[in-house]
Image (cartoon, grey):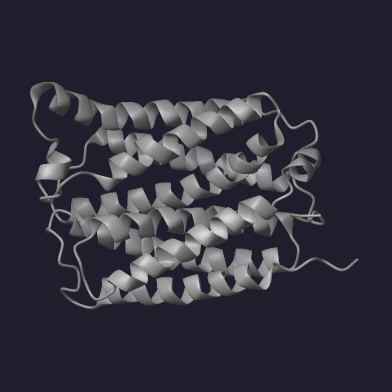
Amino acid sequence: MARTPLPRPYRAASIATLVLTTVATIVGLFVPGFYRDDPVLLPQVYGQDLLTLVVGVPALAVSLYYANRGSLRGYVVWLGVTGYLLYTYASYAFMTAFNELYLVYTTLLWLTLFTFVGGMVRLDAAALKSELGEMSVRPYVVFQLLLAVLVSLLWLSEILPATLTGTTPASITDPGLPTSVIYSLDLGVIIPAFALTAYWLWNHRPWGYAFTAVLLVKIATLGGAVLTMVVYMIRDGQSVPLPQIGIFGTLTAISLGLMGRFLLSLSPDSEPSQ
């Protein structure tokens, strides 16, 4: 039976994303003094670039290949990695100091946003749910709620004391930022997305299954990026709170396990759309 390939605009957008992401990460990692950010931020940027180049780019290339061959597994991973890159280049476009790749970051922002939204709309959520059959949703619901609570507590432990005392968190003042894009993205987008997805999944709504699959891939790659940042920060002599290492390390490991279980529950012959 013939498989339905990805529509040409999504293929083209993903190929352009692969090329631009490869260029951006190689320049960032290997051109000395390219980033103009405060030294306290540089280990985080280098860690993000390294994970994106070593894991994100190959994962997007392989998943794009299989998604274009009509594989539901490939399609889900393709969307998840695209979501990771959307988050990454939204951060770069809004947070990093202006440099010669600014237009590359903004281009990657709209390319990944276009691909992610269009890809999600095209996904047949009801068919995905049907493929999973009687798979227990409890571990996925618990994990997503746990992630939402832990990350909320982690950021609020910095935000609330500063709010009550009329000061600014050190993570903002030390690098000289006006505010934290990471706080904004996590508290304004990512955490509500996990909470809503957990609610939908608990009620066995098709889009709960769809967003769970995509968010698991996204959090696995993002968690890996955070841990890579931690390595760079420690090498730079910066102090990293042990709870943050423990939280992100644990969440990354759990997300990898749950992601593997989810993907293996899908039939290799399943297609993402009808």
Rendered view: 141 above or below 23: above
Viewed as shown, does residue 118 lie left or right of 270?
left
Q: Residue furthest right?
A: 1
**Relative image position of residue 148 (x, y in whole percent):** 43, 30
Quarter of the image for residue 186 reads top left
Q: Nearer the viewer, residue 132 or 120?
A: 120
Please identify the quadrant where the C terminus is shown: bottom right
The residue lying at 28 percent from left, 32 percent from top is 155
Quarter of the image for residue 110 reads bottom left
The residue lying at 28 percent from left, 47 percent from top is 181
Viewed as shown, does residue 168 lie left or right of 27?
left
Q: How many marks?
A: 0
Rendered view: 234 above or below 110: above
Q: Nearer the viewer, residue 182 or 111?
A: 111
Q: Residue furthest top?
A: 164
Rendered view: 199 above or below 212: above
The residue lying at 39 percent from left, 60 percent from top is 51
**Relative image position of residue 133 (x, y in whole percent):** 80, 35
The residue lying at 87 percent from left, 68 percent from top is 2
**Relative image position of residue 124 (x, y in whole percent):** 74, 48
Rendered view: 254 above or below 90: above
Please identify the quadrant where the N terminus is shown: bottom right
Viewed as shown, does residue 176 lie left or right of 118?
left
User: Is residue 191 visible to us here?
Assistant: yes
Q: Nearer the viewer, residue 244 or 64?
A: 64
**Relative image position of residue 71 (x, y in whole percent):** 74, 60
User: Is residue 139 visible to us here?
Assistant: no
